[in-house]
Image (cartoon, grey):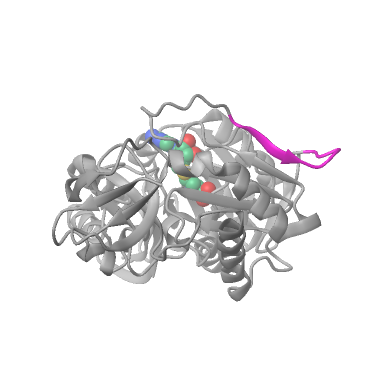
Amino acid sequence: MEYITLLPRKEQSLERRHPWIFSGAINNASGPIEEGDVVEVRTSNDEFICLGHSAVGSISVRVLSFENVPIDQEWWNQKIADAIAVRQAINLPNEKTNCYRAVHGEGDLLPGLIIDIYNHTAVIQCHSVGMYLDRQKITLALQNAFGDNLHAVYDKSKNTLPPNCDIQTFDSYIYRVEGYNSDQEIIENGHKFQPNWEEGQKTGFFLDQRDNRDLVAYYAKGRSVLNTFCYTGGFSVYALANGAKQCTSVDSSEKAIHLCKSNILLNNPKGEHSEIVADALQYVRDMKANEFDLVILDPPAFAKHQKALLNALQGYKRLNAKAMERMPKNSILFTFSCSQAVSKEQFRQAIFSAAVIAKREVKVLHQLSQGADHPVNIYHPEGEYLKGLVLLVQ
Ligand code: SAH
């Protein structure tokens, strides 16, 4: 195995167990290294510090282990078993929920790897070449861990691998039992959904909002709900199941609206539902004053990287200000940012500015984050990507 040597003192962040090594920290390499190779990392004093997947870009190595052990099938079996043990500790799956994130990248000390479970199907999403090259071992480890409960492993890495990497791939099943049918219903907190991992966004469903959907349900009774950026309609299903008078779901994608509508019907809602294909910002700008007394704003990441930060903050400010301006007294706003580049404080500041522009009294009722199956590694605070506030608008 080739090794790389760090510049003096560049091991400090690794001693604090941060899992990334930036290109500027590297002095030299022992030989040619291909993107995705497992490499050993040594300090400037030639001491072992970690093993990781090499990458091209500003992050040159993603750490796999701070111990000098072989990264073989046995290692993979243990890592996947460890991740599943974390989910068992937080009671997932359970009788009401059979879909959850089994591996959350850095949060599970597996940087660049996402695995979502939809009942008997695992969907793997690799964000690094190293993880992609290990996908067969990962699949075998999943089979070892889940046994007969695993019916299929779908690889959905085509759109998440680094854009300039050498790998040409298409999304496909790595493993499937005979007679497998991908048309499957899942349950989340007792609500039914039909995710589509083959064609849907991300791995097919946004599992990170599960707990927050329950909180929407808590406040929905008797309210008129606007769910913008609704995708598969998760918040809408929960709101209608818990006594919302009416719910309007808005998304710019026709496919998303189609999924949303079928998920609503799957749950036999009592309240009235309407679904609208529209730009959410435009919709919020045009909505009548006092039309909705519970509004959900869950846009896609406005800032995918640091350079887009200022524009993203402006975007959150504008969207939230428009919504607040039109909401009646004592209405409830659920507002989210899933941009990793936007910190909790920056998001809160953008919402503060929105309240000033809208000239409303606003109280923070809850501060939200991603579900516990998307754990944040304490040494990698960047992992807390989902930020949410529940606000009382007066
Ligand atoms: N709230 C969803 C997840 C939102 S993902 C859930 O709980 O599952 C973001 C969604 O925003 C996607 O469905 C995408 O199609 C939609 N979207 C992106 N830009 C949009 C825009 N300008 N207006 C409305 N929807 C948009």
The residue under the point 36% across, 53% down is: 40
Image quadrant where residue 177 sits: top right
Left/right placement of residue 390 relative to residue 92 reads left
Residue range in magenta is: 171-181
Left/right placement of residue 173 relative to residue 298 reads right
Q: Position of residue 348 (x, y in %)?
A: 25, 61
Instruction: Give 37 or 216, whichever is nearer the viewer.
Output: 37
Indicate whether residue 306 is drawn in magenta.
no
Indicate whether residue 175 is drawn in magenta.
yes
Left/right placement of residue 68 relative to residue 60 reads right
Image quadrant where residue 235 sits: bottom right
> Is 180 drawn above or below residue 171 in the view shown?
below
Q: Position of residue 155 (x, y in %)?
A: 60, 38
> Is 249 drawn above or below residue 98 in the view shown?
above
> What count of labels does the image hold?
0
The residue under the point 23% across, 52% down is: 5
Q: Is residue 271 visible?
A: no
The residue under the point 59% across, 68% down is: 87
